[in-house]
């Protein structure tokens, strides 16, 4: 029967390994995904027990809902953003590298599974033997009293040389009986590593897409800021013209004139700075898209208006998060892989039973090689047990167990980090939403004030200076509001990344998690 690695207690003060904490930390969906590991061959991977239990729901969540890990960016309801995301998914170099790493992991899994099958290889050859009689086999015949004296007595005369040509064709095979489960555990470890690699791809995919959305929001804000800065420059140009006129008529002193000119220069100085930031952001988007894109100007029009509308965040338990977040899934799979590796290394301490041999046709005459009577076979059953290897095998076991402890600690950290990131993202999103609402109210008031001053100026009641001041104040509030909208998008993006996907505000449905392999194949088509 296969070797079952012993369960070890952690020396860490914050966590300790116990299998029964699966029921505390993980939802039934995750437990079901680990059932395959809970077999006679190998016990389930150890799970760190957190000092504080995970909360039943997120503190800042509002309504019931469900999570959706795929195409979460479409919740922004922006077709231009969708087009940019499609270009990134098709050409991004980081994603191409992540896909290549997945293919490597799949190849390693196939390699690890190969010992489960016998090694079979055909062979064909010619063996030409030629040696002097007084050496080798001829010398041995002389020692058996077949020398010259005996030769003359029995009428046998040895030639000066002995030669023999043998033709053979057949097949060689070898197979190791996996009595202790070493090969099976190695294959299972490679399978778990493959699942972890697929989850790593999803993590990289999430990172690339969030960076794409962030850059897109930044470009949209910078273009809006550039347009507002141009309008502010026009306002200050009008104020400068008014100051010149008032100065020529002696209604203001030189200080007022210099102030108007200084304000105009400061406003004009904002334009090249915004243009430089915009060029940098567009360049980063080029990199995400896999290189220079001549069609970027057509893809991203001058007027970008990403939606800031948000569905309420659903109340979800952390177990849902553990199912969805690819980094948590990858850490969990690496715990399973490390545990299987411990089993394989412990099996190395026990004897190996292998069967090898060959079967085929053999003849000294080429014309008789395919005669069925010329068949031969060679079978060998070997039992090889390790006796002394300088503690190499036991050190391998100790190394595998230490890596298991490391993987379990990393898994525990990923669980705590995931929950804390969601809590922080929820708080940040709510704060950004409140700030955006306040600034939107302020912008409405500034717009009303500007409209009032314009009406007063047109009707001859108000002065031109008050009208320009109100217009400048309104444009300033619009600039601040645009930045707040960008920050709200950033906060929403942080929550998307923390959740590993999107959320919907419908009635809560059963969370359905697709295997990472199916997600990978869907996203790379």
Image (spheres, helix red, strand yellow):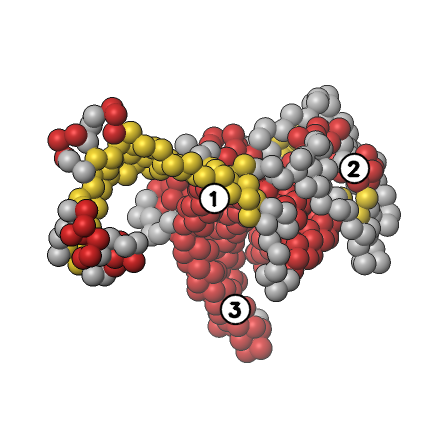
Horizontal and vertical percent position of residue 346: 66, 48
Question: Residue 45, which numbered label?
Answer: none
In this figure, which residue is indicated by the disc labeled 1? 108
Q: Nearer the viewer, residue 302 or 31?
A: 31
The quarter of the picture where residue 464 lies is bottom right
Instruction: From the image, state whether disc 3 or disc 2 is nearer to you.
Output: 2
* Marks 3 and 2, how far apart at CA: 62 Å
In the displayed structure image, the side of residue 445 where residue 214 appears, left or right = left
Residue at the (82%, 48%) spot, across then down:
50
Q: Quadrant of the C terminus?
A: top left
In this figure, which residue is indicated by the disc labeled 2? 22
Residue 338 seen by the camera: no
Q: Nearer the viewer, residue 304 or 296?
A: 296
- First in sequence: mark 3 vs mark 1: 1
The quarter of the picture where residue 379 lies is top left
Question: Circle 2 — which element?
Answer: helix
At label 2, counting other C-alpha atoms closer than 10 Å, the crowd grade (few under 14, some 14-19, many 20 or more) is some
Horizontal and vertical percent position of residue 94: 45, 50
- First in sequence: mark 1 vs mark 2: 2
Q: Nearer the viewer, residue 294 or 421?
A: 421
Q: Quadrant of the N terminus?
A: top right
Q: Nearer the viewer, residue 222 or 512?
A: 512
In this figure, which residue is indicated by the disc labeled 3? 266
Residue at the (19%, 46%) spot, across then down:
154
- First in sequence: mark 3 vs mark 2: 2
Question: Circle 1 — which element?
Answer: helix
């Amino acid at each position: 029967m296969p070797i079952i690695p012993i369960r070890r207690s952690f020396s860490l003060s914050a966590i300790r390994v116990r299998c029964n904490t699966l029921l505390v930390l993980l939802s039934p969906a995750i437990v079901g995904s680990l059932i395959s590991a809970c077999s006679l061959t190998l016990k389930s991977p150890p799970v760190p027990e957190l000092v504080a239990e995970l909360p039943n729901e997120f503190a800042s969540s509002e309504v019931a809902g469900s999570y959706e890990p795929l195409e979460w960016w479409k919740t922004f309801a922006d077709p231009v953003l969708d087009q940019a995301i499609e270009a990134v998914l098709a050409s991004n170099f980081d994603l191409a590298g992540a896909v290549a790493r997945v293919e490597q992991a799949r190849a390693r899994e196939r390699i690890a599974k190969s010992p489960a099958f016998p090694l079979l290889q055909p062979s064909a050859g010619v063996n030409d033997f030629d040696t002097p009689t007084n050496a080798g086999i001829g010398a041995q015949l002389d020692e058996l009293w077949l020398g010259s004296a005996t030769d003359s007595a029995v009428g046998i005369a040895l030639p000066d040389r002995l030669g023999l040509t043998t033709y053979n064709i057949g097949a060689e095979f070898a197979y190791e009986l996996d009595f202790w489960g070493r090969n099976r555990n190695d294959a299972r470890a490679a399978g778990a590593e493959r699942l972890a690699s697929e989850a790593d791809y999803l993590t990289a995919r999430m990172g690339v897409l969030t960076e794409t959305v962030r850059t897109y929001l930044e470009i949209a804000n910078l273009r809006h800021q550039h347009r507002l800065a141009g309008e502010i420059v026009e306002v200050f140009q009008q104020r400068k013209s008014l100051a010149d006129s008032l100065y020529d008529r002696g209604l203001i002193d030189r200080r007022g004139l210099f102030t108007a000119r200084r304000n105009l220069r400061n406003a004009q100085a904002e334009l090249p700075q915004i243009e430089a930031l915009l060029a940098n952001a567009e360049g980063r988007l080029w990199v995400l898209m896999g290189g220079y894109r001549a069609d970027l100007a057509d893809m991203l029009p001058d007027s970008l208006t990403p939606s800031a509308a948000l569905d309420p965040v659903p109340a979800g338990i952390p177990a849902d998060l553990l199912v969805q977040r690819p980094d948590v899934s990858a850490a969990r799979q690496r715990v399973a892989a490390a545990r299987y590796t411990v089993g394989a290394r412990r099996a190395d301490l026990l004897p190996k039973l292998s069967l090898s041999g060959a079967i085929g046709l053999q003849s000294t005459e080429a014309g008789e090689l395919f005669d069925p009577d010329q068949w031969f076979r060679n079978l060998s059953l070997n039992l090889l047990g390790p006796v002394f290897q300088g503690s190499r095998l036991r050190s391998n076991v100790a190394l595998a167990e230490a890596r298991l402890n490391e993987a379990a600690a990393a898994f525990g950290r990923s669980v705590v980090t995931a929950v804390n990131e969601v809590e922080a993202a929820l708080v940040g999103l709510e704060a950004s939403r409140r700030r955006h609402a306040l600034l939107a109210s302020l912008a409405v008031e500034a717009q009303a004030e500007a409209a009032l001053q314009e009406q007063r100026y047109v009707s001859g009641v108000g002065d031109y200076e008050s009208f320009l001041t109100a217009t400048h104040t309104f444009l300033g509030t619009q600039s601040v509001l645009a930045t707040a909208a960008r920050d709200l998008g950033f906060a929403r993006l942080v929550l998307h990344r923390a959740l590993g996907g999107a959320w919907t505000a419908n009635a809560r449905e059963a969370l359905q998690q697709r295997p990472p392999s199916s997600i990978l194949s869907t996203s790379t088509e």
